[in-house]
Amino acid sequence: MAKPCYTLKDKTLNGLGNLIRLLPTGTVFIYQFLNPILTNNGHCTIINKYLSGILIALCGLSCGFSCFTDSYTDSEGTTHYGIATMKGLWPTSKSMDTSSYKIGVGDFVHAFFTIVVFGVVTILDRNTVDCFFPAFESTEKMLIMVLPPVVGAISSVVFMVFPNKRHGIGYPSN
């Protein structure tokens, strides 16, 4: 049986798909929906650059913030979401002990690498590249070939060392 031949585009999209799984789905959707509008499909004026930069910053902050959210199911089967703090989840009901949801080093590691992965997604977006780096054509092919696998490999190793046990806002529940 012949081995399937994968093109550069197939490998890139596969690597990008694996990276996107590490991001909150709502944030990625908002970015992909608004980015073509705010970048004017890559034909940016100074206003488009500012608006796109604000979108990227807000989405990056959202990715980082979502790493500090978690959920629990109460005795009635209702799912409650909160923000992880040094004492547990906030806000929480008085009847539920959420002290096991305290913030830890792994949360900060996850937040950092989630923001890095989102950064890779933005750099690989054609409209963003055309808007901010119009002369990026010559090295784009090499970057697209190298960046997703490298960031994916590093992130995978880090996420194995610091497994994510949170089921926060924007992430699918298990």
Image (cartoon, rainbow, N blue to C red):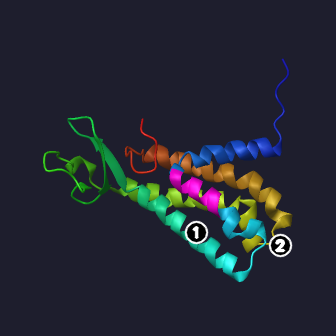
Tag 2 residue:
135
Q: Where is residue 146 in the image (x, y as percent from the top left)?
A: 73, 53
Q: Is mark 2 on a helix, strand or loop?
A: loop
Residue 14 in the image, given as x and y percentages of width and height: 69, 42
> What span is colored magenta in the figure?
26-34
Residue in view at x 53 percent, y 63 percent = 59
**The N terminus lies in which quarter of the figure?**
top right
The residue closer to the viewer here, 74 or 2, is 74
Q: How far apart are marks 2 and 1 (CA)?
A: 22 Å
Disc nearer the start of the sequence (2/1): 1
Q: Which residue lies furthest to the left in this view?
A: 95
Residue 124 or 91: which is nearer the viewer? 91
Vertical relation: 136 (above or below) 28: below
Whether 93 is among the magenta residues is no
Who's the residue at 83% across and 41% down the image?
7
Q: Nearer the viewer, residue 33 or 1?
A: 33
Residue placed farthest to the front in the image?
37
Q: Where is residue 52 in the image (x, y as percent from the top left)?
A: 64, 71
Residue at 67% from the left image edge and 69% from the top image edge: 38
Mark 2: few, some, or many residues within 10 Å (few <14, many ≥20)?
Answer: few
Dot 1 alpha-carbon crowd within 10 angstroms: few under 14, some 14 to 19, many 20 or more: some
68 lies above or below 128: above
Q: Is residue 119 above or below residue 165?
A: below
Q: What residue type is labelled 1?
A: Leu
Q: Residue 55 carries which label?
A: 1
Determine whether, in the image, residue 89 is placed left or right of residue 50: left
Q: Toward which corner of the image does residue 111 lie, by quadrant?
A: bottom left
The rendered magenta stretch, by its main secondary structure, is classed as helix
- Give the residue type that dot 2 points to: Ala
